Image: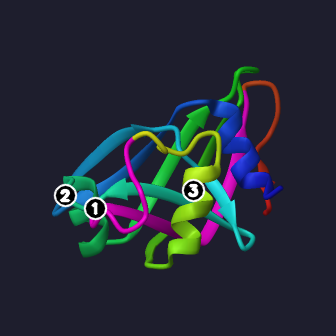
Amino acid sequence: MNKIVEALKDTGVFYIATAEGDQPRVRPFSSVTEFEGAIYFCSNNTKQFYKQITENGKVEVCGMKKDGAWIRLTGRLVRDDRDEARAAMLSDPTGPSDLYTPGDGIFEVLRVDDAVCTQYSMTGGPVEIHP
């Protein structure tokens, strides 16, 4: 499994920061999957989050693991319009299968490009996590 996806799943809940003009916006997420070796998140295309990432795809993700270490991921979200990517997200245990279906017109999956992920802790130096 992609080590970054594994680390995000280990947090349970992680937070994705976007930008709206000069104002940062942060939201909790828990759905993440690996598809074709890449990291994928999902959203509803009627939400402000989706509007923000279509205007500026740069995001930062942060989550704390059960052992007290935290991860920080930076990257750019890119829409993937394939139903195969949607199906992968919905089949993942973290996926929102009770909220969306492929072809419903609102379910969007977003691939993370240019991902850089680092794990931090109070007891050691930063460690880069590679897919």
Query: Which residue is more in the foreground, 48 or 128?
Result: 48
User: Disc 3 or 1, which lies upstream in sequence?
Assistant: 3
- Crowd around label 3: few <14 · some 14–19 · many ≥20 (10 Å): many
Q: Are marks 1 and 2 in contact (CB under 8 Å)?
A: yes
The quadrant of the picture occupied by the N terminus is bottom right
Cα separation, mark 2 vs mark 3, equals 18 Å
In the image, residue 96 lies in the stretch drawn in magenta: no
In the image, residue 111 lies in the stretch drawn in magenta: yes
Residue under circle 2?
A: 46
Mark 1 or mark 2, which is nearer to you?
1
Question: Do we see residue 14 in this rendering?
Answer: yes
Cα separation, mark 1 vs mark 2, equals 7 Å
Quarter residue 49 falls in: bottom left
Question: For the residue marked with disc 1, what is the amino acid?
Answer: Ile
Which mark identifies residue 57? Answer: none
Residue under circle 1?
A: 106
Residue under circle 3?
A: 89
Estimate the x, y position of residue 47 in percent, counting from the top left: 21, 53
Quarter residue 125 falls in: top right
